[in-house]
Image (cartoon, rainbow, N blue to C red):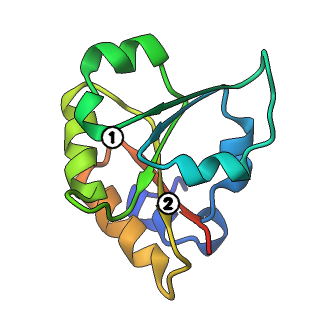
C-alpha cells in the first residue's frame, strides 16, 4: 500500500537529505551557501546555482530546472513556508530541502510542510 505524503514525511530514515542532494543533477541554493561544504565537486555531472530569494523567478526555475532546491528553514526575513508558496506559484514541483540545525522532532516540520504543499517533496538537511 503506498504511503501518503504525511506518512512518508514521518519516516525518520528519509529526513536527512545528504544522499539525495549528492545525486541531484541540478541544485538551486537559495541563500544556503553553507551547503557548498557538503557537496563533492562533480564537474559535468552536477550543476549548482546560488541565488537570493528576491532574485527567484519562474524564468529562473525554467532555466535552472533544479532537481533539488535547498533553502534555510528560517531566514532573517522569510521562512520555508513563504518560499514554498512562491516556488509552487512559479510552477515548481519537486524536492525542497530545508537547511537547519539538528532538530529534536524534525519529522513534525516535514509533515506540516508536506500538508501545506503536497506538490513539493520536503526533506531536512541538518548541519551543525
Residue plotted at (77% across, 20% down): 45
Q: Secondary structure at mark 1?
A: loop
Residue 103 vs residue 46: left or right? left
Residue plotted at (66% across, 44% down): 21
| Location of residue 89 with respect to 63 vertically, above or below | below
Residue 6 location in percent, x, y?
39, 64
Give the position of the C terminus as an image quadrant. Answer: bottom right
To which residue does mark 1 refer? 119
Residue 47 location in percent, x, y?
64, 23
Q: Secondary structure at mark 2?
A: strand
Q: In the rendering, which numbered label is found on residue 99?
A: 2
| Location of residue 60 with respect to 18 vertically, above or below | above
Residue 2 vs residue 89: left or right? right
**How far apart, in angstroms, are the residues tagged by discs 2 and 1?**
19 Å
Residue 1 location in percent, x, y?
55, 56
Residue plotted at (29% across, 29% down): 56
Residue plotted at (50% across, 82% down): 103
Amino acid at each position: 500500500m503506498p504511503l501518503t505524503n504525511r506518512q512518508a514525511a514521518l519516516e525518520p530514515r528519509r529526513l536527512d537529505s545528504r544522499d539525495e542532494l549528492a545525486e541531484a543533477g541540478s541544485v538551486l541554493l537559495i541563500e544556503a551557501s553553507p551547503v557548498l561544504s557538503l557537496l563533492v565537486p562533480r564537474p559535468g555531472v552536477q550543476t549548482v546555482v546560488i541565488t537570493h530569494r528576491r532574485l527567484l523567478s519562474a524564468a529562473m526555475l525554467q532555466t535552472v530546472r533544479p532537481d533539488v532546491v535547498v533553502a534555510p528553514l528560517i531566514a532573517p526575513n522569510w521562512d520555508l513556508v513563504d518560499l514554498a508558496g512562491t516556488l509552487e506559484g512559479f510552477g515548481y514541483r519537486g524536492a525542497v530541502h530545508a537547511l537547519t540545525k539538528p532538530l529534536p522532532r524534525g519529522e513534525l516540520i516535514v509533515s506540516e510542510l508536506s500538508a501545506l504543499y503536497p506538490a513539493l517533496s520536503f526533506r531536512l538537511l541538518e548541519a551543525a
